[in-house]
Image: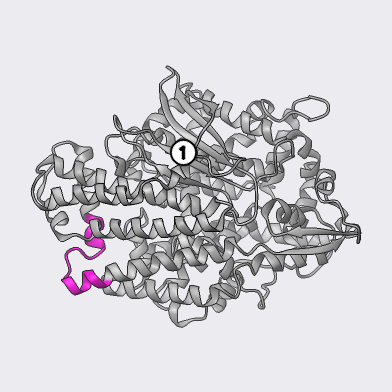
Amino acid sequence: MRLLDDVPGRIARARALQTAITTGTVSGSKVLDAYDEASATLVDGAHRAKLIQQTDPSAATRSVARQAAEELHEALLALSLDPPVYQALSAIAPDDPVARHYRDRVVRDMRRNGLDRDPATRARVRELQLILHGLEQDFEDAIRSDERSAAVPAADLAGMPASYLAAHPPGPDGLVVLTTAQPDYLPIQRFCRSAAVREKMWRLFQERGRPANVPILQALLTTRLELARVLGFDSFADYAAADKMIGTSAGITAFIDSAADASKAAAAADYARLLEFSARTELDPWDVPYLIEQVRATSYGSDSRDLLPYFEFGRVKAGIMALLTSLFDVHFTETSSASAWHGSVETYEVTDGSGALLAQVHLDLHPRPDKYGHAALFAMDAGKAGRRLPSCALVANFPGPGDLLMPAEVRTFLHEFGHVIHYVLAGRGHWSGLNGLTVEWDFVETPSQLLEQWLADPRTVATFAVHQETGDPLPAAAVERLRAAEAFGRGLETRRQLVLATLSHDLHSATGPSTPPSDIAAAAHRGLLPYRHVDEVWQHLSFLHLAWYSACYYTYQWSLVIAKDLFTAFAGDDPGVAHRYRDQILVPGSSAPAATLVSNFLGRPHNADAYRAWLTTPS
């Protein structure tokens, strides 16, 4: 398989460059060049292995990919924890400001990982990092491989869209098999009238990864805490925050508190309305998405089931690509690729307005067994000016070609393509280590959240939202009703996200390891959400982001604050704002701190005014 290309060769090339640095064969600015190329050789290989591990249909190939990822990660640790490399980088003083920024960032990260410590500390850090890499993969694998199912009577699916029922016919016994794959699960939660079916599927979905992840999560938290303590941090949350915009664990707590305050009134109003609508005094978690859809349909005239015929998968995909062309002057052309890992994967070449090739993008968009169960961009090659083009894969679990998408799935599609365009445009700088999505992790969601805003633009939506039977575009009035309807439930959804952010942080706080994870999850829910917490469900064991984001799930709301602020620049009459955004935010990658890029674009530091206004929009 080409994606799992010559791993020993990659490691050998990186080691040769590492040796050139440590022996003084290269000097001056060439030290940073050698480090960047060695690092990119290993990182790109590890990214490719990660992609195959999460998407390949063959268990044997996934196992080979995991081994490759571990070998590449070990080689990367050997590079980033090599004292002579650290000393050589510390000794240079590049004149170019971008090179200086890169050098400073690399040296900072090396210090953060113990390069200025004694040999015993460095050896323990290396050992702990290797253990953590394996545990994180174990945690993810336990969730990805645990797709659950239930059979329910066809009569219990009242309220489901006709297209869903057609795709889920009953068997000879009259039962319909439902799975925890997102195209099955999410519509059930939104539309199924049977609370019993919603509850059954909700419980199955929350408990993926159990019981395998019970000891894995405990080992993960214990090992992360030891790593942080060895490196002089009070908690892993402090360690994880140190290279982010937010800076500290205390900063994460303060931000979550401020976002909770901003969403408090809206969440209370949302819940009061749901109670009134349902004539109940308490709601369960599986009631909330369903009732929100009911209120949006009855009170705002925006029923997602009525909108489904306008959002055919292929048209939506083509429409989003056309939107990126109009905004950023990039063009997508489908091509064949020998590196595709499954027959359903599509490959596109991305070019600029002059026809110059910018990148290669793979789309793996439909569910299958043992595949990554959410939606995400997977890096492959970060790109480097004059040496290689960026390449990446968008992995998702949408219904198949010809099938219909819910508005929420269209939003997810836009979101993920926001990552794609950021990765593509940020892949042309001189330094691989500053290209792709190497910005601070609490900024990485901002461009994707910004692109979501175009779902509220009637002119954009009309270009791809066409009724599958009549051919009529979605009326502008319907888009306006959708926009107004989506304001309802925003407070509760924000607080649900803050529950996850709190869980993510508090599991990794100084006191987290001494508190059972289930207690932390319960406290987060009860402190932020008004509906019932289900004690006998262990949701944290299926919380996939605990592997990738560790203590930093707060980044979604932090990035959203910045995205809402950036979008204010698009509200005026500046015809060049999209190109300015492209050139000042996307193209630079991480050639400067994210706060600097944002300030340059806005002409001021970012603030939370637009975010707070969005949360308090009347519904």
The residue at the point 12 percent across, 51 percent down is 88
| Residue type beneath disc 1 | Leu
Answer left or right for 307 relative to 261.
right
Helix, strand or loop for the magenta stretch, by majority:
helix
Position of residue 487 measured from the top left corner of the image (x, y, whole percent): 66, 47
Magenta stretch: includes residue 117: yes
The residue at the point 70 percent across, 71 percent down is 532
Answer left or right for 205 relative to 557.
right
The residue at the point 56 percent across, 79 percent down is 519
Q: Is residue 451 above or below residue 206?
A: above
Answer left or right for 79 relative to 493.
left
Give the labeled residue for mark 1: 566
Q: What stretch is highlighted in magenta?
A: 108-124
Total marks in image: 1
Magenta stretch: includes residue 31: no
Q: In this view, does 257 lie above or below 17?
A: below
Q: Within 10 Å of the Cα at label 1, are there few (<14), some (14-19), or many (20+) other Cα atoms?
A: many
Answer left or right for 325 relative to 438.
right
Position of residue 486 measured from the top left corner of the image (x, y, whole percent): 68, 46
